[in-house]
Image (spheres, rainbow, N blue to C red):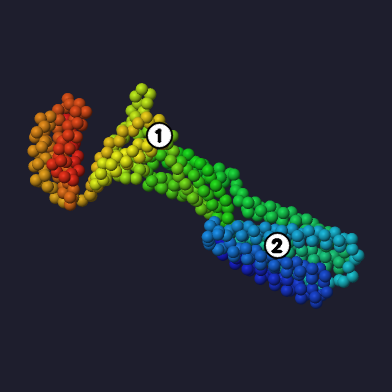
């Protein structure tokens, strides 16, 4: 859009500069003071358009180390300068109109050349107004608005000059000055509005309704628990939004990233010219205590996996148990230090936990692909299982070999009247015996009622 604006302003500059040249030449030929004055105004308008053009071109520059949000504000600055220039010219028109109303009747009467030059300038101004009006509707921009007001002012001043020429010819010497006074007041009002708007843009003002809409969009996005601060600012055509959202504390990183992407997409659908940055933070308010403890333990360096997290309340105090897996190659001292850090972190972030009991386990990565079954290993396991009368039936024994790791799955049937605690103790004992017999084994026993 910035590129389109510069092209429009270039066309506008060429048009108004041609009007200056024509009015200057024909004003000198016809000895028309009004036309010469209007040519000076056209020259000033050309200078202001050059300022606006430079501002629009500088706004095209991409973000850099010193302008991380880009250079869009330069266009607002250009609009501010243009608005101030319009206001000063309008004040000059008002002053000149009042001054000339009190002055003697002019003695120099312009001729046909002055009218021809004035008509040419009117044609140029109408062309600029149509071009700029269409461009403002299509691409917007403070620089185009400022140049549009300049074109409007130039058209008005030229009409006043021609009216003055005609009225002077018929003896109505003050009609043009009264028209110029009205035009000056109108342009002063327009310029003040432009200066006010561009000044607000430079102070990063943003519509409260727009912020409210963004908050509503974010809060309605699935997965968002709460909406925090929303910081928004405009730079040129782009609206920058910095949004903080709260997600459930046990939300995985992948899920959190997806929710953030959904938030960004939803804002973009509502505000196409927005550039959004989404920050997410955990919210543990409605998250189960077990899930919170699980998440805390996983963040400790050296922890490979966490499972079997449970909490229970006794005599008004809350206790926690969890199984923490660490590298199987590290020694007991190192593993114990990790468990201490886990416990300290849990008690710091969840002060209602009286004590956390950490069960350390070796972590073994289970590959996705195994080689063929190891029948020799399966015979050894069957021999171990025969020593347990509590096992009523041995089902499937699958032993898959991968380099130096054995993945062993065992199906066993127990008396259906046995307590789950007894079954758990038996399966844990069997796993330990198999692990002592077969090194680097990852064992899973599936107990079933007989």
Q: Quadrant of residue 334?
A: top left
Q: According to the image, label 1 marks what residue?
A: 350
Rendering coords of residue 198 (x, y %): 65, 54
Instruction: Identify the residue at image location x=58%, y=55%.
Output: 235
- Indicate left or right for 257 with 423 as reference: right
Q: CA distance from mark 2 to mark 1?
A: 66 Å
**Number of numbered discs on residues:** 2
Rendering coords of residue 135 (x, y %): 61, 61
- Indicate left or right for 124 with 381 as reference: right
Instruction: Identify the residue at image location x=33%, y=28%.
Output: 312
Quadrant of the image containing the C terminus: top left
Q: According to the image, label 2 marks what residue?
A: 150
Instruction: Identify the residue at image location x=35%, y=43%.
Output: 300
Foreground residue among 273 and 138: 273
Rendering coords of residue 347 (x, y %): 39, 34
Q: Is residue 118 above or below residue 241?
A: below
Residue 80's disc number: none
Q: Earlier in the sequence, mark 2 or mark 1?
A: 2
Foreground residue among 188 and 58: 58
Foreground residue among 197 and 202: 202
- Indicate left or right for 96 with 154 as reference: right
Residue 294, visible in the rendered structure: no
Q: Nearer the viewer, mark 2 or mark 1?
A: 1
- Indicate left or right for 2 with 43 as reference: left
Q: Pointer 1: residues within 10 angstroms few (<14), some, or many (20+)?
A: some
Element at label 1: loop
């Amino acid at each position: 859009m910035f590129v389109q604006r510069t092209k429009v302003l270039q066309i506008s500059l060429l048009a108004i500069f041609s009007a200056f040249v024509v009015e200057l030449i024909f004003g000198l030929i016809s000895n028309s003071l009004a036309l010469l004055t209007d040519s000076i105004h056209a020259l000033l308008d050309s200078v202001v358009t050059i300022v606006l053009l430079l501002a629009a071109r500088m706004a095209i520059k991409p973000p850099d180390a010193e302008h991380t949000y880009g250079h869009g504000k330069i266009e607002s600055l250009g609009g501010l300068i243009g608005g101030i220039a319009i206001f000063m010219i309008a004040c000059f028109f008002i002053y000149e109109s009042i001054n000339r109303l009190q002055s003697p009747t002019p003695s120099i009467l312009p001729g046909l050349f002055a009218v021809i030059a004035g008509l040419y300038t009117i044609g140029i101004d109408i062309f600029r107004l149509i071009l700029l009006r269409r461009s403002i509707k299509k691409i917007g921009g403070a620089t185009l608005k400022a140049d549009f007001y300049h074109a409007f002012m130039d058209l008005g001043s030229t009409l006043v000059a021609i009216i003055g020429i005609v009225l002077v010819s018929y003896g109505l010497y003050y009609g043009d000055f009264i028209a110029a006074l009205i035009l000056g007041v109108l342009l002063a009002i327009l310029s003040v509005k432009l200066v006010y708007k561009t000044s607000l843009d430079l102070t990063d003002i943003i519509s409260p309704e727009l912020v409210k809409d963004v908050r509503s969009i974010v809060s309605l996005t699935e997965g968002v628990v709460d909406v925090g601060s929303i910081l928004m600012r405009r730079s040129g055509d782009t609206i920058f939004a910095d949004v903080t959202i709260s997600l459930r504390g046990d939300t995985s990183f992948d899920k959190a990233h997806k929710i953030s992407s959904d938030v960004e997409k939803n804002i973009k659908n509502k505000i196409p010219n927005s550039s959004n940055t989404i920050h997410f933070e955990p919210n543990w308010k409605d998250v189960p205590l077990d899930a919170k403890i699980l998440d805390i333990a996983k963040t400790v360096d050296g922890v490979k996996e966490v499972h079997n997290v449970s909490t229970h309340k006794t005599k008004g105090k809350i206790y926690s148990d969890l199984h923490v897996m660490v590298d199987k190659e590290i020694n007991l001292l190192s593993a114990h230090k990790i468990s201490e850090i886990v416990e300290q972190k849990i008690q710091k972030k969840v002060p209602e936990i009286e004590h956390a009991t950490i069960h350390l386990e070796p972590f073994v990565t289970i590959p996705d692909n195994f080689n063929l079954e190891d029948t020799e290993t399966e015979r050894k396991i069957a021999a171990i299982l025969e020593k347990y009368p509590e096992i009523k039936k041995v089902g499937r024994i699958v032993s898959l070999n991968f380099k130096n790791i054995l993945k062993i799955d065992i199906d066993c049937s127990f008396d259906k009247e046995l307590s789950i605690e007894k079954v758990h103790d038996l399966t844990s004992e069997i796993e330990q015996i198999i692990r002592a017999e077969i090194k680097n084994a990852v064992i899973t026993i599936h107990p079933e009622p007989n």
